[in-house]
Image (cartoon, rainbow, N blue to C red):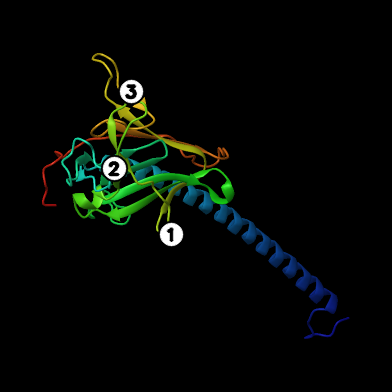
Amino acid sequence: MTRSGESGVTLIEMLIAVTLFSLLSVAMIFAMRIGLNAFGKTNAKLMEDRRVGGAQRILLEEIEGIVPVSAPCLGTSKSPASEPGAAQTISFFQGEPSAMRLVSTFSLQLGWRGMPQILELGVIPGENGQGVRLVVNEIPYAGAPSAGQFCLGFAPDPITGVTMPRFAPVQAGPQSFVLADQLAFCRFSYLSPAPQPGQPPVWTPAWSAIGWPRGVRVEMAPLEADRTRLQPITVTAPVRLLRTPGIPYAD
């Protein structure tokens, strides 16, 4: 018989309780770790999808904000038709398969609220030589001469034979912003007017006409396809000229 008023637990019961509590704590830690890992992977995928979607939106807005700037070509080589010592005025737009230069009212930092920018878009090799990446440089637009400094002179187009301005190459630097990375390819094409009446406009890999194209297409493909992530796709943007070239605007 146990004497009245005595109560307690044995050492074995204490060990069993501590063991069960430890096992429960370990199980809770593992469950929290699995949940946090799943949350981290989901968040990383969402951020990657937002970055890809944001880059495509930026491309559209940069092209849609194009400004038809007429700038003096300040290169050393002048067109034979120009007067001695005078800089010939050009339609400021550089359109090549892997480089594009234009003036846009859209800015990466200030969106549509900032001052116009000279945008330099270029395709450069990717990290460790794997694939390519699309980068953009922003240079404040300070009037037509600030754009004309990128014109190096004139030369006949190898396809059409028309004398066209030559531009400085687009180069990436520390301030370059990477719009898309880990791409299998990235190339630009430009919508030209119909060659003959009644025919549809034609997409060309290089802009070799006076003025501005009717549209710009940026073709991209991922280096490694992943159906679980948002993939870079082709972006096609119309070019709507809302300003008349040659007319100075106060803004």
User: Nearer the observer, disc 2 or disc 3?
Assistant: 2
Outermost residue toward the front in this view: 84
Question: In the structure shown, which secondary structural element does the residue marked by tag 1 occupy?
Answer: loop
- Residue identifier under label 2: 153
Q: Position of residue 64 (x, y in %)?
A: 27, 40
Residue name at image x 52 percent, y 42 percent: 229
- The residue under label 2 is which amino acid type? Gly
Outermost residue toward the right in this view: 1
Q: Position of residue 52 (x, y in %)?
A: 45, 45
Mark drawn on residue 202: 3
* Residue 173 relative to residue 115: left or right: right
Mark drawn on residue 4: none
Q: Position of residue 238 (x, y in %)?
A: 28, 33
Q: Earlier in the sequence, mark 2 or mark 3?
A: 2
Q: CA distance from mark 2 to mark 1?
A: 28 Å
Question: In the structure shown, which secondary structural element does the residue marked by tag 3 occupy?
Answer: strand
Residue name at image x 46 percent, y 38 percent: 186
* Residue 11 relative to residue 130: left or right: right
- The residue under label 1 is which amino acid type? Pro
- Residue identifier under label 1: 174
- The residue under label 3 is which amino acid type? Val
